[in-house]
Image (cartoon, rainbow, N blue to C red):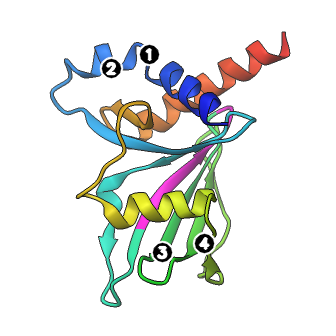
Amino acid sequence: MRKRSIALGLALGAGLYSWSTAAALAADFYILNVTNENNVSLLDPTTIVSTQAGNKVFHFAEIGEFDLWVDNKVEVDCAGKRLRKLSAVSHLAGGSTVPGLSSPGPWGKLETGTVGLKIHDVVCQWPNSKPAENSVYVATDFKSAVSRISNRVYELNQQKKK
């Protein structure tokens, strides 16, 4: 799975780094997970904020094919190693949105080796510790990053079907 993530990360970043390094306003976004179906979880670190309780709230996108992505607002309890979704909105290729979760879900305990724990570690340690290399995706803005990754996921899945 790690090799698959690295390969997809390289494929996602190929060409984009050469274009974006010249861009004056490029930003780093973090690839948190890649599934066997090439779905990608992407974090916009500029959305990470601390709550009064000491937790962190942030947005991340779950990206699939055809510009379909889910914008998740999540809260993580850094000390208690718990996570819960606060809201979720699906964005469809035609530009429409479909509300998903509109009120906070239950807290889930994060287990060793899970994607949730990886997300916890990235968010809770940011900005003192940041993902590097294949986990960093550079684009001018989050929407562009989501769209480009979605297109690349589509291309990779088409190649698998051949």
Amino acid found under the numbered disc labelled 1: Ala
Rendered-image quadrant of the C terminus: top right
Between disc 1 and disc 4, the foreground one is 4
Quarter of the view holding residue 113: bottom right
Q: Circle 1 sits on which residue?
A: 14
Rendered-image quadrant of the N terminus: top right
Q: Please, what secondary structure does the residue beneath circle 2 have?
A: helix
Amino acid found under the numbered disc labelled 3: Glu
Amino acid found under the numbered disc labelled 2: Tyr
Q: Circle 4 sits on which residue?
A: 110
Vertical relation: 133 (above or below) 46: above
Q: Distance between the residues labelled 3 and 1?
A: 32 Å
Q: Please, what secondary structure does the residue beneath circle 3 have?
A: strand
Looking at the image, tell me whether mark 4 or mark 3 is earlier in sequence order: 3
Which residue is nearer to you in this view: 81 or 141?
A: 81
Crowding near the residue tagged with mark 4, few <14, some 14–19, many ≥20 C-alpha atoms within 10 Å: some
Q: Which mark is residue 75?
A: 3
Q: Residue 6 carries which label?
A: none
What residue span does the magenta drawing correspond to?
Answer: 58-66
Residue 136 position within the rendered picture, expressed as x and y whole percent measured from the top left: 38, 36
Q: Please, what secondary structure does the residue beneath circle 4 have?
A: loop
Q: Residue furthest left?
A: 24
Residue 34 position within the rendered picture, expressed as x and y whole percent measured from the top left: 62, 40
Between disc 2 and disc 4, the foreground one is 4
Q: Distance between the residues labelled 2 and 3?
A: 31 Å
Which residue is nearer to you in this view: 127 or 24?
A: 127
